[in-house]
Image (spheres, helix red, strand yellow):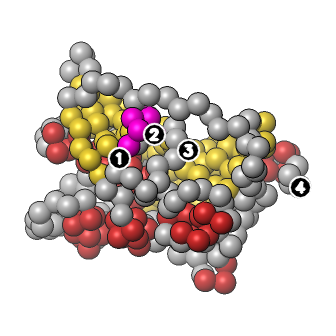
Amino acid sequence: MSAQPDQLQSWIGRSETVDDAINSTPVVALTATLDHPATPVDAGTLLPPLWHWLYFLPMHRQSEIGADGHARRGGFLPPVPLPRRMWAGSQFEFRSPIRVGDRVARTSTIDDVAIKEGRTGKLVFVKVRHELRCNGAAESALVEFHDIVYREAQRPDDVVPPPQAAPAEAAWRRQIVPDDVLLFRYSALTFNGHRIHYDRQYVTQVEGYPGLIVHGPLIATLLMDLLRRQMPDADVASFRFKAVRPTFDLNAFHVSGQPQGDGKTIRLWASDHEGWLTMDATAVLR
């Protein structure tokens, strides 16, 4: 890795603020993508948890896009010289509502940069803190920590981590078929050009995966959507998820949930067609 640790860690504390309006069209589009019936989306409609990802989209010029479909390294994020980039997980605090019609400012800060040695070589973890404030408010409506992991190119002798079995018991379970159209629509809604989600030749021949990779944020959104389907009036105070294993478009997968004994904690998880855990999450209700 050519960049030195001190050079990458000098990005810690860098910050940027962008503004956006919570308009109705992305809400209508994701509602359709998640296969819900069409409903009116008027000003004042509550934005469901995680749907803020439909806004503050990365509007990089075409000339700024790298070979993987992301913006070239550098700028706000540190210039990590490793080819594979994945969304490793996130943690959220939902402090006050965000509604259609709100004007929202998002302040993003590089919270940490950590360089580690893993089973497959060098790993760089970047943690970004996002704070969303509505209509000029001083207090944050939403705080999100976003964990990004960068990896070396896949090698033939890489050691694959042993899979972890998903929980056997679930109060709720839903099958998801991750076809090309679902992945394309979510990429389009989030203006995500990362080629691992839609370019089969690139993801198999360049990055060495067996198929298209289902977006981590899409799986997290499906987990939260499962909670909303089962508990429509739930008021979510916090949510966290960790990506455990990639999910590919080659087979259907499941999203599942199990309320815990305290009445407020909901364990949510995704599992592949073989029953291996692919994402582990926890929601806490108010």
In x, y percent, where is residue 154?
72, 52
First-in-chain label (3 vs 2): 3
Residue type highlighted by circle 1: Phe
Res 100 visible? no
Contact check, label 1 and label 2, Cβ < 8 Å: yes
Real-space Cα separation, disc 4 to disc 1, in angstroms: 38 Å
Real-space Cα separation, disc 3 to disc 2, in angstroms: 11 Å
User: Magenta span covers which residues?
Assistant: 273-278
Vertically, is 215 above or below 118? below
Q: Is residue 199 magenta?
A: no
Residue type highlighted by circle 4: Ser
For residue 85, side relative to residue 80 (left or right): left
Viewer-side residue, 95 vs 223 = 223
Q: Disc 2 on helix, strand or loop? A: strand
Q: Residue at x 31, y 42 (%)?
A: 255
Q: Disc 3 on helix, strand or loop? A: strand
Vertically, is 34 above or below 189? above
Real-space Cα separation, disc 1 to disc 2, in angstroms: 9 Å
Residue type highlighted by circle 3: Ala
For residue 78, side relative to residue 249 (left or right): right
- What residue is shown with label 2? 278
Nearer the observer: mark 3 or 2; the answer is 2
- What residue is shown with label 3? 88
For disc 4, the neighbor class at 10 Å (few under 14, some 14 to 19, many from 20) is few
Real-space Cα separation, disc 4 to disc 2, in angstroms: 32 Å
Nearer the observer: mark 4 or 1; the answer is 1
For residue 264, side relative to residue 60 (left or right): left
